[in-house]
Image: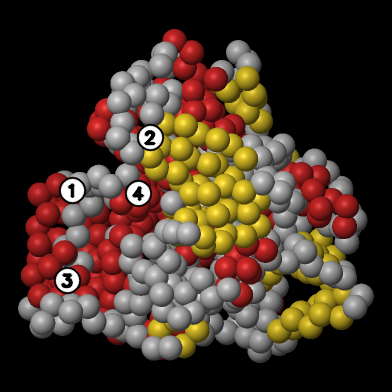
């Protein structure tokens, strides 16, 4: 066990520095913390040759915690096992308390499970690295990490926390002046913007309710009320938990291994719908993050380079559906059959089939080779998994719901495969392992205009559904709730929604015998993407008004979000690059891909890598 309190200050850099650098980090959630960690690590590595660094942290809440702060109920859990989270991304270099990951921190702090709550106690059961912990513990870990970072600062680094909000950023005499809500200002050479989701989800009005904070649902929704939830992803899972577990309901594991819901009587009647009509897939039980060990067979670096660059070595715009997707689907197919072969005949068998499929891909006879594999290991149609629900129609509501249940049940069975050895989940996990490959193709205007729109609307969410879902227990709970009749999924994909002052009517579109129902409340179980042209943040709105930031655009067409260079600087309305400003995290989704995550090693390390590049430039590290 790591004893947090035993380790002392480890960095004492002789303060013999030659220059000064002043930086502001606006927004100290997980991404701001990742930037701070990189800045401080950079300063430590530079040692006595480094500058005197002052970092102004602008954050109105507890620094570090971000949206995980506050007193959130324990049923709001993280969607990644705690053993995969660490704010210190490079364990081989961990030589101090900062090297302590989330799991080690939780254990060392004394947290244990008591029923479905995490408490500091000697009772209950120990936490394991595979557990999905309550988000509030992540908030505590992040706040702890920040405090340690400050406490163990080398002598040439100073951190000043401004417990307030930044309302504007103004260029003055070659500096950036950050205006703060408490009336003070800070003058710096660089501003790192990590303000997260920024545009708060709309508060809703009348029968329409915003999802967060979940306590708001308690006040608005009476027991027995009729509620319809729009969205079937992670936010919807939170809503279902709040309206069942949060209302005193419990789950029991029956002798047949299935979960049964025991209602409290305080639940409303809940119906779900979404565009695809299907829930997010479960995380495979006990599986490791594949990113660092996965060797692509189809999406090889050479093949991806060929896709991204023309013959003259210039970056070309790709059609994701026509050019990238077939490669991803073939990679998934290969992974499915390799894992099937591994289960049947071991490593050599897996390698053999993977090589055969990869060769067949290069030689243009992939389908024939897949047909052969299918004869031995059964059929796997990667596209029908990715685009499940697309074009589905049903005789009636019962048939639509039965299909949803079947898809969840099949997925749960795969997620619970002994030892995590599921060929289907191996195929899905390819999409996590190749996240950076997808980024390299789609980011910073890598797609044609039409393809960018198609990717954002129809492909991105499909990938997220497969690999960024909840722990399998949440999917088992959803099945139990549907079985108990507490949750229904009666409409099939993409129904029509009509909002009236005193209620909401939902009408099916894909059922031969149509279904129309009326509800008292509609919960919007999805989060809008942040943007600068319609931002609820006065700071971003002002930067946009002044032309220092503009919407992301392809071929002159505005597409929302924020326009960035590949070095993470915003581009102004006149095309001028704002070289002293840097943007990371959710605000950059659009020109970037998959930015809403807690920075950590493996598939979540990119946040540190990018922040590291930014910090090297700020500290003028020679590479
Ligand atoms: C409900 C919910 C649950 C999620 N669960 C998970 C999960 O389990 N796992 C996961 O990996 N990801 C999850 N995410 C995705 C989430 O976006 C990231 O995990 C993470 O919180 C992003 O970190 P961040 O630092 O970019 O943003 P945030 O955590 O939102 O932090 C941004 C910070 O900026 C501050 N700020 C904003 N504006 C200003 C300003 N003008 N001046 C000063 N400070 C400002 C805010 O106070 C806040 O502290 C979840 C997202 C939501 C909305």
Give the numbered dot on residue 411: none
SS at circle 2? strand
Query: Quick check: 183 above or below 567?
Result: above
**In the figure, is residue 455 to the left or right of 528?**
left
Alpha carbon of mark 2 to alpha carbon of mark 4: how far? 12 Å
Among the two numbered marks 4 and 1 on one chain, the one whose residue lies closer to the N terminus? 4
- Could you tell me if residue 157 is visible in this image? yes
Q: Which residue is mark 1?
A: 623
Q: Which residue is mark 4?
A: 618
Residue lying at 30% horizontally and 35% vertically, measured from the top left: 18
Give the numbered dot on residue 52: 2
Task: Give residue 318's position: percent from left, percent from top.
Answer: 28, 82
SS at circle 1? loop
Picture quarter containing residue 355?
Answer: bottom left
Mark 4 touches mark 1? (CB < 8 Å): no
Q: Which residue is mark 3?
A: 305
Q: Nearer the viewer, residue 186 or 335?
A: 186
Residue lying at 13% horizontally and 77% vertically, measured from the top left: 313
Alpha carbon of mark 4 to alpha carbon of mark 1: how far? 13 Å
Q: Residues within 10 Å of mark 1 (few under 14, many from 20)?
A: few
């Amino acid at each position: 066990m790591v004893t947090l309190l035993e380790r002392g200050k480890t960095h004492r850099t002789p303060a013999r520095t030659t220059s000064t650098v002043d930086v502001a980090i606006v927004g100290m959630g997980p991404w701001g913390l990742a930037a701070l960690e990189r800045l401080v690590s950079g300063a430590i590595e530079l040692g006595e040759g480094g500058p005197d660094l002052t970092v102004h942290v602008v954050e109105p809440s507890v620094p570090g915690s971000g949206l995980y702060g506050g007193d959130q109920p324990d049923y709001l859990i993280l969607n990644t096992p705690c053993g995969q989270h660490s704010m210190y991304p490079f364990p081989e270099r961990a030589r101090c308390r900062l090297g302590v990951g989330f799991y080690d921190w939780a254990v060392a702090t004394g947290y244990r499970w008591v029923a479905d709550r995490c408490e500091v106690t000697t009772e209950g059961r120990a936490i394991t690295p595979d557990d999905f912990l309550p988000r509030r513990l992540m908030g505590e870990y992040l706040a702890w990490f920040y405090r340690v970072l400050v406490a163990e600062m080398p002598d040439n680094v100073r951190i000043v926390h401004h417990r307030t909000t930044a309302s504007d950023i103004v260029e003055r005499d070659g500096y950036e002046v950050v205006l703060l809500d408490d009336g003070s200002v800070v003058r710096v050479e660089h501003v790192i913007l990590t303000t997260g989701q920024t545009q708060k989800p709309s508060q809703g009005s009348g029968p329409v309710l915003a999802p967060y904070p979940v306590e708001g649902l308690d006040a608005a929704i009476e027991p027995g009320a009729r509620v319809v939830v729009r969205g079937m992803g992670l936010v919807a899972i939170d809503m279902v938990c709040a309206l069942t577990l949060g209302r005193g309901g419990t789950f029991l594991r029956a002798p047949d291994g299935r979960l049964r819901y025991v209602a409290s009587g305080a639940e409303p009647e809940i119906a779900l719908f979404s565009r695809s009509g299907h829930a997010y897939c479960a995380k495979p039980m006990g599986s490791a993050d594949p990113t660092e060990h996965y060797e692509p067979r189809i999406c090889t670096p050479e093949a991806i380079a060929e896709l991204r660059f023309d013959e003259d070595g210039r970056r070309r715009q790709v059609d994701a559906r026509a050019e990238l997707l077939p490669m991803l689907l073939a990679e998934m197919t290969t992974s499915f059959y390799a894992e099937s072969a591994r289960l049947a005949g071991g490593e050599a068998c897996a390698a053999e089939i993977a090589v055969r499929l990869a060769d067949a891909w290069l030689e243009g006879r992939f389908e024939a080779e897949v047909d052969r594999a299918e004869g031995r290991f059964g059929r796997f149609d990667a596209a029908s998994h990715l685009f499940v629900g697309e074009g589905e129609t049903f005789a009636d509501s019962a048939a639509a719901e039965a299909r949803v249940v079947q898809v969840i049940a099949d997925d749960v069975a795969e997620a619970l495969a002994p030892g995590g050895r599921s060929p289907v989940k191996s195929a899905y996990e390819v999409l996590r392992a190749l996240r950076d490959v997808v980024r390299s193709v789609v980011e910073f205007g890598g797609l044609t205009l039409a393809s960018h729109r198609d990717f954002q609307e129809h492909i991105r969410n499909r990938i997220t559904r497969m690999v960024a879902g909840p722990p399998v227990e949440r999917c088992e709970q959803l099945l139990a709730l549907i079985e108990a009749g507490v949750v229904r999924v009666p409409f099939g994909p993409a129904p029509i929604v009509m909002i009236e002052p005193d209620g909401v009517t939902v009408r099916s579109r894909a059922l031969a015998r149509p279904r129309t129902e009326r509800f008292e409340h509609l919960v919007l179980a999805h989060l809008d993407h942040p943007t600068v042209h319609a931002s609820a943040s006065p700071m971003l709105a002002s930067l946009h008004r002044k032309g220092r930031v503009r919407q992301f655009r392809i071929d002159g067409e505005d597409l929302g979000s924020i326009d960035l260079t590949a070095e993470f600087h915003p581009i102004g309305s006149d095309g001028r690059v704002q070289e002293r400003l840097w943007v990371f995290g959710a605000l950059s989704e659009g020109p970037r891909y998959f930015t809403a995550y807690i920075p950590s090693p493996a598939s979540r390390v990119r946040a540190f890598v990018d922040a590291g590049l930014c910090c090297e430039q700020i500290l003028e590290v020679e590479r």
